[in-house]
Image: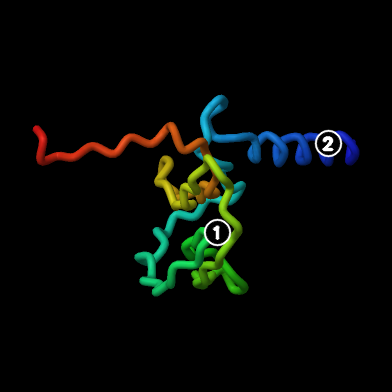
Amino acid sequence: MKSKLISLLLAGTAAATIPACMGTTHGYVAVSSYEEAPPPLREEYVTYRPGYVWIHGSWQRGYGNHWQWQNGYYVRERPGYVYQDGYWQRRGRGYVYVQGSWRPRGQIVIRDHRRW
């Protein structure tokens, strides 16, 4: 009985880490959900570093179940890709964290609203 329960728990955890929308690059959804919304994002001052991309910091739950700020950091850029930062998304009565992810540069369309 215990082994079946453990198997079900492991299967549920694995299923929760499957990409949120199959076939898209929205990242992975966090397993945990919190009813309390995270605080507003903090401003981070960064300098341009050729060959690197800044991954913006985010709020995460730490010890004692309190919100703690995780500072941003640089990663090497990937030619032909852009990084979409992770974000907290409201789902039902709670909030889940969607991990940031890399996606092909061609999927982003920037429109000049002044031409409308």
Placement of the N terminus among the 4 image quadrants: top right
| Extreme residue in the top direction | 23
> Which sits in the foreground, 34 or 21?
21
55 to 107, vertically: above or below: below
Q: Disc 1 residue type?
A: Gly
6 to 35, vertically: above or below: above
Image location (x, y in percent) of residue 6 = 83, 41
> Which sits in the foreground, 14 or 54?
54
Placement of the C terminus among the 4 image quadrants: top left
As measured in the structure, the alpha-carbon distance from the residue carrying label 1 to the one carrying label 2 is 44 Å
Seen at 52% across and 42% down, the residue is 81
Image location (x, y in percent) of residue 95 = 45, 50
Residue labelled with disc 1:
51
26 to the left or right of 14: left
Q: How is the image coloured?
A: rainbow
Closer to us: mark 1 or mark 2?
1
Label at residue 39: none
Q: Secondary structure at mark 2?
A: helix
Seen at 55% across and 67% down, the residue is 73
38 to the left or right of 62: left
Seen at 29% across and 39% down, the residue is 110
6 to the left or right of 46: right
Q: Disc 2 residue type?
A: Ser
25 to the left or right of 42: right
> Which sits in the foreground, 6 or 21?
21
Disc 2 crowd, CA 10 A, few/some/many (<14, 14-19, 20+): few
Count of numbered circles on the image: 2
Residue labelled with disc 2:
7
54 to 103, vertically: above or below: below
Image location (x, y in percent) of residue 21 = 52, 30
